[in-house]
Image (cartoon, rainbow, N blue to C red):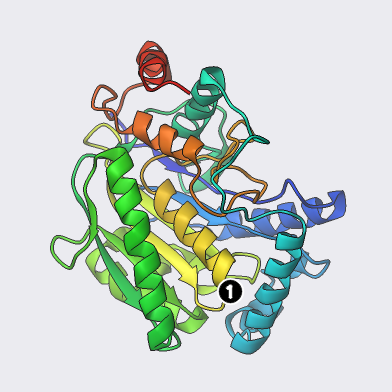
Amino acid sequence: MPFQQRFKVYDKLKALSKNAQKCCKKVRKQMLKQVKILSPACIFFTLLFLNGCSGQIASLYSDNNKESLISSNENSLKEYYAQLEKKKLSMGLLRQDAGGSDTPFDEEDIIAAFEQLAFYNEYQVDENQLLPSSEPVSLGKWNSEINISTRFGDSVNFEQKRNDLKEINELLAVLSRVSKHKMRISENDVNMFVIVGNQKEIVNLTGEIGKQLFEFDPKRIPIVAQLPKEIHCMAMTSVSSHKNSEIESALVIIRNELPKVMRKACFHEEISQTLGLTNDSHLARPSIFNDNDEFATLTEFDKILIKILYDKRLKTGISRKEASKLVKQIVNEIGA
């Protein structure tokens, strides 16, 4: 059977004005033109855009602007993200309350969201071209234990590194408990990397990782070397073409310039999405798997979705149609 590649890009566009949306779409189009998949590794990308686009962004990927992208000043980026976080918080976004009486949901909401998040991707790769895709895909998740190596650039000071490790460990404890799938920071049999650094460090660290996991070689992923400020963090998962869509490796990239809440949001969404819920949907609420940045941290809704995904009755490679009755049964057993 010929190998097929699928590619996913997540955009945070919902809260933007119409002009900004058009602008971001142009950026996305330019980004997608750069992507070259050079070997048979099935890779999903999640790109987390937590803010709008300025009028300048449409030309970000022109040759004249490449140097300015790479050499963005760390201090100016920190100030930019600090102001952006302040604005979002003032709008009631980036919530950390896990949802409440203002975000009710029922079993039908859970089922609808799960089907969109687990069985759909926005794009597929065909002969190195990105094509829009509305076709359902088979279920992908990890079967092996997830051993995570954290890599920090020198720009991450000791205190920040300690805080980041604490954040990651606490998140992994929650995800492991909910999914009943072992996730831990370990240097043994590493199959996921989490990178935190500035632009130059991200490129260098990804280059080192690419020597171990060729699917994440930055030469194959041009966007890594040219991250515009509108991309705050990203995640990639490599899915086996021989083991029924089993996820085999993953890479998460976090900008060091991010302030506290946006940084936390990046850890939560990107690491969580590498588990297999690789789409975003407006049907997911309250959720971090949504395009509107309403929530920064895992919600009770999200935990239910992850619990369903890692129910042993749902096997990797199962189709949406095959899983439909099982999903309803599992949701009914869990209860909303």
Using residue 246 as the reference point, say whether residue 220 is left or right of it: right
Residue that appears at 45% across and 63% down: 221
Q: Is residue 40 visible?
A: no
Which x, y percent locates residue 309? 35, 32
| Pick the front one: 238 or 177 | 177
* Label 1 residue SS: loop
Using residue 164 as the reference point, say whether residue 13 is left or right of it: right
Q: Is residue 260 above or below residue 170?
A: below
Residue projecting furthest to the left: 188
Which x, y percent locates residue 125? 47, 42
Split into 4 quadrants, where in the image is the N terminus? top left
Instruction: Categorize mark 1 by other alpha carbons within 10 Å: few (<14), some (14-19), many (20+).
Output: some
| Pick the front one: 83 or 52 | 83
Using residue 310 as the reference point, say whether residue 49 is left or right of it: right
Q: Is residue 24 above or below residue 255?
A: above
Which x, y percent locates residue 154? 40, 88
Using residue 66 as the reference point, say whether residue 263 is left or right of it: left
At label 1, which amino acid type do we have? Answer: Pro
Count of labels shown?
Answer: 1
Which x, y percent locates residue 83? 73, 74
Residue, disc 1:
259
